[in-house]
Image (spheres, rainbow, N blue to C red):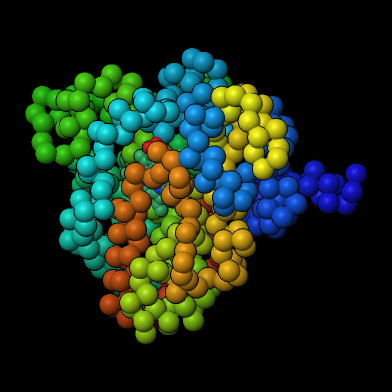
Amino acid sequence: MTVTAETLATIDLTDNDRYAEAVPYADFDLLRREDPVHWHPERDGPGFWAVTRHDDVVAVSRDTAVYSSQFGATALEDLAPDALAARRSMIDTDPPEHTRLRRLLTADFTRRQVAGYGDRVRDTVRAVLDTALPHTTFDLVERVATAIPIRVLCQILGVPQDDEALLIELGDRMIANTDPDLAEVLLDSPASDAYRLLPFRSPAALDMHAYSRRLHDRRRVAPRGDLVSRLATAGLTGQEEDAMFLLLIVAGNETTRSALSLGVQAFLEHPGEWERLRERPDLLDSAVEEVLRWTTPLHHFRRTATRDAVLRGRRIRAGDKVVVWYTSANRDEAVFKDPYAFDVGRYPNPQIAFGRGGPHRCLGEHLARLEIRTVLAELLRRGVRLEAAGPAARIRSNFTNGLKRLPVRVVA
Ligand code: HEM
């Protein structure tokens, strides 16, 4: 074995402990350079192809006929047919099934529709900051980054504000299912077998489904103008309704929270970029794109090959797992000049945090951008400067790139 082959063989992208420390960027750099479509063995599975270059991630995302989201779903975990069926949500479908479900949501999340949420998002951000900033020293994850996305989402879905805390808790327990601080049953523990028919193998999904059931039943009887009312009267099966509700809450909540908290952390570590933005507020839109590239709140999604194929010279076999790593694509030196520089003026910036190139491209991308932009704009408007007030804590997960804690101090 050559030195490079030996080093490549030691890379373990599934080791959640490493992500609790830091994103393993050096491994991704090596993979992009030496073996961009890399066969990665798994301790408890058949192994997968790790796709790490930007153009290959786009190509795989685009080709839904060969790289299916439905065949084996989109998580790394291997699911038996009964679990696949029980857990399937829109994100785990291919066209035409996917087209039917996505059509029900598109109108609520277009660029134009989301622009119409601007005032509501601004009011929400202002209310949250009004509560957080007087504390002078506080946990930005808890008081700001967690509070905003769920409130905005609940308004769009038509979920009562009183239930926000419950949905945050359930969402956290599900998506951070490899972090003992957040989940009571860990994905890689034998105890999770009892929950294998539930999304994320998490008992919290039972509570989320029960909540969804009650809300849809109420809205069916007395519809309002909100999204859940429309879904409740769209002729979906109960499984489809619950899976869609759970997907929207989980996808729209944790991801934006991570972009906000890791985004603020990026400015704490690059105070010059905050000053630059203060002097050049016209850079706000490019700053949002850079925050998205820099933070990449979801590390990967999985596809499954429907037939034999060739990707960058590697022979993929029908049934192989193919994992696209957005985290790596967003540091691809072939696409981004000086990818490890946090540059609020970066242009062009074809960041891929929302996926790119296929029908599954993030439904909530305009909403997420609006929330990030509004938080940055509101902090600038108030002349706020923050500094770190203690060590941050990262979520132990190779799927969600997030923080559990970010202590900050208001210095101006
Ligand atoms: C910074 C925040 C966000 C990030 C980084 C993000 C990232 C992603 C990614 C990577 C995908 C998968 C793309 C693919 O498979 O090709 C996705 C899909 C999705 N996202 Fe987001 N997302 C964010 C915010 C949101 C928000 C606010 C919502 C609110 C509704 C949302 C709803 C969804 C849904 C429903 C899907 C599935 C789309 C489909 O299967 O057609 N996301 N997101």
Image coords of residue 315 (percent x, y): 70, 33
Specify the farthest residue to the bottom: 279
Residue 270 lies left or right of residue 223; in this view the side is right
Q: Quadrant of residue 344?
A: bottom left
Q: Residue at x 42, y 25 (%)?
A: 88
Relative height, residue 301 to residue 411 (above, below): above
Name the quarter showing ligand 1.
top left
Viewer-closest of 180 and 102: 102
Tell me the quadrant of the picture where the C terminus can be found: bottom left
Residue 208 seen in the current view: no
Q: Residue at x 17, y 61 (%)?
A: 119
Image coords of residue 59 (percent x, y): 54, 43
Q: Residue at x 41, y 33 (%)?
A: 91
Residue 279 seen in the current view: yes
Q: Quadrant of residue 258?
A: bottom left
Image coords of residue 250 (percent x, y): 39, 40
Specify the farthest residue to the top: 82
Q: How many marks?
A: 0
Residue 99 lies left or right of residue 75; in this view the side is left
Specify the farthest residue to the right: 1
Tell me the quadrant of the picture where the N terminus can be found: top right
Relative height, residue 142 to residue 17 (above, below): below
Q: Residue at x 47, y 52 (%)?
A: 353
Residue 276 lies left or right of residue 125; in this view the side is right
